[in-house]
Structures are given as C-alpha cells and as structure tokens.
Image: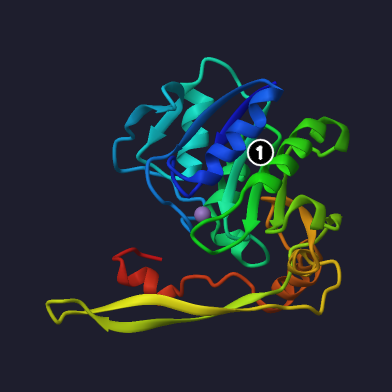
C-alpha cells in the first residue's frame, strides 16, 4: 500500500509524524505537508505565488517534502506532479483539535482529504480532540492505522472521505467506534479589538464553541461520550431536497428580466 500523509498543522507537527510512523508498517509512506501552520485555511489553493518544495528529513531519514502552500496544494501537487507513484490512500492529520460540525468547513485537515477524494483516491482525515500543547497521539495513531488497514473492507465509494475524530483518552478508555453525521455545533465568534506595541489597533478572532447535543448520532456527541467518530463526507454540496420546490418557485415567480426597449435605444441602436 502506498500512502500519502499530510496535515494542516505543518510538517513539524507531532501529530503528522505520529500518523506517518503508525502507517509505515502498512507499506510505503511519504509525507507532503505545509512548511508551516495552516489550520483553518479550508480548501484554499495557491494560485498567484510559486510553490517551493524542500525535502524533509526526520531522524536522519528522508521522509517527504515540505511545501510553502496549503494542505490542498500539498495533495494536488503530490498526486499530480511530485510523486513517482499514485497513492492508494491519502491520510491527513493527526490534527491537534477536533474537526466536527461546522469546523469541517474551515478545516485544512479535512480539505486535504477532500482533495484526495477529488483526485479519485480513498482518503481519511484524522483529528484528536485535545487542545493542550503537549498531546499523547499514541491511541489515535493506533486507531488511524487500524482504520487505514481495514479501509478497503468498508466499501466507501470514491468521492466520499472518512472524517475521523478521536477522543483524547488512553486506548482502553475509548468506548468504541460510532458512525456519525456532521453535527450542528457552531461557534459564537467575535473579534477582540487590541493594540500592538506601537498603539495600532488590530483584531484577533475569539469565540466559544456551542456544543449542540440535540442530534444523538452527531459527531460531537459521540466524541463527548468517549467514542471514535467516523463521519462519511462528500464534497457534493447540493441541497437535493430544495431542487424541486425551488425550481417551481423560480418558474412561477421569476421570469428572466428583459432589457427594456428604451435601454436598447440608449445604446444607439434603432429598434
Ligand atoms: Mn490544524
């Protein structure tokens, strides 16, 4: 099995190397990851700057490449142009912090896996529900390897990625694995108005996460209860239920506006 490992916390992040180390027994692993912290960049691509690729070594071994781009850049570049082989799996993470509910939209970790699915490669995103600076990735790494190893048996269609969130607990305290839906938790955000040492004003994003527990099979709920949460995610964003009623409403209420006769004349045309 050939595995591309990436993340959004940057190529130095402990979670990335925990994941790469965990997956190495399964086959050939190469890391292609952002050269710096890229959390919450979503699916951004670099289109007006050159992308630079630098070989990256860990413990004296060449393990991959650092890219001055986003997580989606890394996967697209690796698969289309950089690697001598096509990966069988894209594994993104292990992110430092959960990626549930609305966070899925902002997450660079999930977007790297989304890019993998866009390129037709089975992909997973892994996130650990921990926020303190020193984090133990051991249990999460074991679970990541277990899921990557058994992914072919799960029957996940191309175009769907698995968004995996893991509670920050020792393995023996994790209660099991639940398949979940994207939850409804949201951020109540604001920007703190601050001053830099020169007295100039700046804004810094702050907020609190409002945990929604009304949907029993939601990602956040499983995580809080001590379960690994696996949410199948597609990049297809169409609201299928609205297609028919919206189409009817548009047909009835919104005939296409036509340019008036007078405005045609204003262009100097003769009718
Ligand atoms: Mn991150």
Q: Is residue 76 left or right of residue 56?
A: right
Q: How many marks?
A: 1
Residue 178 higher or lower than 22, as above or below: below
Question: Secondary structure under badge 1?
Answer: helix
Residue of label 1: 117
* Left/right of residue 223 with respect to residue 41 in the rendered view: right
Q: Quadrant of the N terminus?
A: top right
Image quadrant of residue 151?
top right
Q: Residues within 10 Å of mark 1 (few under 14, many from 20)?
A: many
- Tell me: residue 254, above or below residue 82: below
Q: Residue at x 80, y 38 (%)?
A: 157
Decide which of 240, 88 is in the foreground and name it: 88
Q: Position of residue 50 (x, y in %)?
A: 29, 36
Q: Identify which residue is drawn at 78% across, 55% down.
A: 228
Whole-percent x, y for residue 235 in the image: 66, 50
Q: Is residue 58 above or below residue 147?
A: above
């Amino acid at each position: 099995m050939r595995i591309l490992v990436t993340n959004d916390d940057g190529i130095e992040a402990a979670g990335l190397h925990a994941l790469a180390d965990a997956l190495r027994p399964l086959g050939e692993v190469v890391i292609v990851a952002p050269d710096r912290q890229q959390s919450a960049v979503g699916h951004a691509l670099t289109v007006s700057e050159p992308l630079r690729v630098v070989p990256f070594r860990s413990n004296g071994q060449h393990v991959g490449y650092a890219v001055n781009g986003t997580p989606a850049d890394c996967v697209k570049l690796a698969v289309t142009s950089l690697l001598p082989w096509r990966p069988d799996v894209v594994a993104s993470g292990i992110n430092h912090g959960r990626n549930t509910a609305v966070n899925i939209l902002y997450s660079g970790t999930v977007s790297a896996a989304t890019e993998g699915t866009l390129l037709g490669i089975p992909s997973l995103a892994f996130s650990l529900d921990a926020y303190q600076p020193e984090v133990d990735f051991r249990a999460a790494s074991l679970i990541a390897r277990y899921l990557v190893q058994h992914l072919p048996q799960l029957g996940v269609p191309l175009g769907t990625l698995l968004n995996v969130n893991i509670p920050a607990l020792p393995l023996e305290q994790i209660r099991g694995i639940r398949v979940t839906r994207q939850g409804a938790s949201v951020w109540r955000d604001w920007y703190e108005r601050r001053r830099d040492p020169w007295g100039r004003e700046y804004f810094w994003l702050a907020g609190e996460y409002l945990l929604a527990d009304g949907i029993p099979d939601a990602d956040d709920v499983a995580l809080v209860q001590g379960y690994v949460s696996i949410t199948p995610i597609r990049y297809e964003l169409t609201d299928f239920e609205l297609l028919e009623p919206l189409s009817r409403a548009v047909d009835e209420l919104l005939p296409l506006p036509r340019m008036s006769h007078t405005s045609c004349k204003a262009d100097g045309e003769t009718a």
